[in-house]
Amino acid sequence: MTSSTRRPNVVMILTDDHASHSIGAYGSLVNSTPRIDEIGSEGWRFDNCFATNALCSPSRASILTGTYSHVNGVSTLVTPIDASQPTFVSQLRANGYRTAMFGKWHMGDGDGHDPQNFDHWDVLIEQGEYWNPRFLSAAGLRTVEGYATDIITDLALEWVESLDGDDPWCVLIYHKAPHRPWEPKPEHAARYGDPVPLPPTFFDDLSTRSSSARRALMRIADCLNTEDLKVDPPEGLTYEQLAVWKYQRFMEDYLACVDSVDENVGRVIDFLRARGEFADTLLMYASDQGFFLGDHGWFDKRFMYEESLRMPMLLSYPARVGTGVHDGIVTNVDFAQTILEAAGVASHPRMQGRSFWNDISGEAPAPPPAAGMYYRYWEHDDVFHHAPAHYGYRDDRYKIIYYYNDGQGVAGTGPFVYPGEWELFDLEADPQELRNVYDDPAYKEIREELTVRMWAEQQRLGDLPHPSQPVPDGVSGTRA
């Protein structure tokens, strides 16, 4: 590490639905990602980075604004962002940065919802297409021939090349991949002919979990459709054999999409090195949330369970930070303030995160470590997945979840309300979250402590608990 007074360039590469356990740096057993891993080997790997709402649009809004869903207004896939609100990009731009955004925006489009505070933006419409995608910019809508992951990288690097002068710049490279329906390039798809190992919880029957969890339509055995699978399954398979066949089909395409991402991350790294700017660039790789890769028999995300909650996050900036592993709790809400502190730019007062910049730079005393993190999933009983609305609190060992099971009229939610249910997990004794111990007498004190800590965090953040949740014993006052 060398000292530098130069303000960093900022590159954030964000993927959609890229599970940590399909990245080599996190010990993947199913694939390799050498170029993504390179960011971690040149910098830091974050082992406990979590989404505060494990859904694409809400997570992107939290990353951009440094706020939780109830503050930024993006709580579901169909609650568009007010793009005029302060973001880390608006703060950078106001302080001399050139700014651009390419790829998956997915927070609405049209007046008031298109990207703002960027010198240039060129984004996919909604989920976007893998092949010959449509792009929307200030100049209008057009179709670009080719593969989305390559095109998004092309556009970003071309923009950087076009810049004149010495002003620092920030570019967001936001990929569609590896989001459903997992359409890889043929040369990558051919790499996965051998069986992909099954996760140990693939045949989990969810017997100890709440009915709220069992109600979700996310099982690989039952819920992958013909667009996902692309070919019909062979005849004569048992139910379990068919589930395994579907898993293999899904994983072949998913991992091949990741391969294309890995190649394009390498292109960005090589580009920065060729320009002599790698050391002076704050380069981040993350996904908007995690993803179930057959874990508990599921695909998709949404739940507060670890595979969905956990975000991969790798960061390099050799001029000012060395290498290491950060094992403290950080969230997507923390990204904005961290980037701004690294750039020497004041954060906006409404931002709610905790900057982890001094955790890794050591340039000044770091704020106290986060004791835990608060989560809330709002898109209750949606038409496709029927995942339950819930919130919860996780510390370094325990996790408590309350399924309040009510869409509360929020756009994108279903009409049915179900009784509230609780889950509690001891992540040290049960890292795969197979045993709900909420009603176990041995965990009574832990349960009560976590209920109070979650309530306190809701009060601190200004999020209103659901009316069905009683005020915990020992808490004074009323609801926020």
Image (cartoon, grey):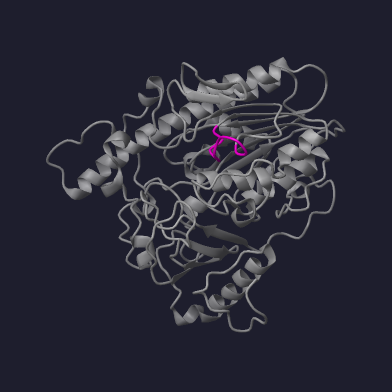
* Quadrant where the image shows the N terminus: top right
**What residue sits 42% from the left and 60% below the top?**
388
Figure check: 104 above or below 137: below
Picture coordinates of residue 354, whole percent (x, y): 72, 54
Q: Nearer the viewer, residue 248 or 219?
A: 219
Q: Nearer the viewer, residue 350 or 343?
A: 350
| 112 within the magenta span | yes
**What residue sits 54% from the left and 44% below the top?**
57
**What residue sits 44% from the left and 28% below the top?**
129
Picture coordinates of residue 298, whole percent (x, y): 36, 50
Total marks drawn?
Answer: 0
**What residue sits 67% from the left and 62% below the top?**
461
Figure check: 52 above or below 284: below
Q: Which secondary structure is most common in the magenta stretch?
A: loop
Q: Nearer the viewer, residue 39 or 340?
A: 340
| Quadrant in the rendering for residue 85 | top right
* Quadrant where the image shows the C terminus: bottom right
Image-based side of 311 in relation to 212, left or right: right
Picture coordinates of residue 41, whole percent (x, y): 64, 36
| Magenta region, residue range | 104-113
In the rendered image, the residue lying farthest to the front is: 111
Image-based side of 407 in relation to 61, left or right: left
Q: Nearer the viewer, residue 245 or 166?
A: 166
Picture coordinates of residue 380, whole percent (x, y): 44, 58
Residue 138 showing in the rendered view? yes
| 451 within the magenta span | no
In the rendered image, the residue lying farthest to the left is: 236
Image-based side of 331 in relation to 243, left or right: right
Residue 327 showing in the rendered view? no
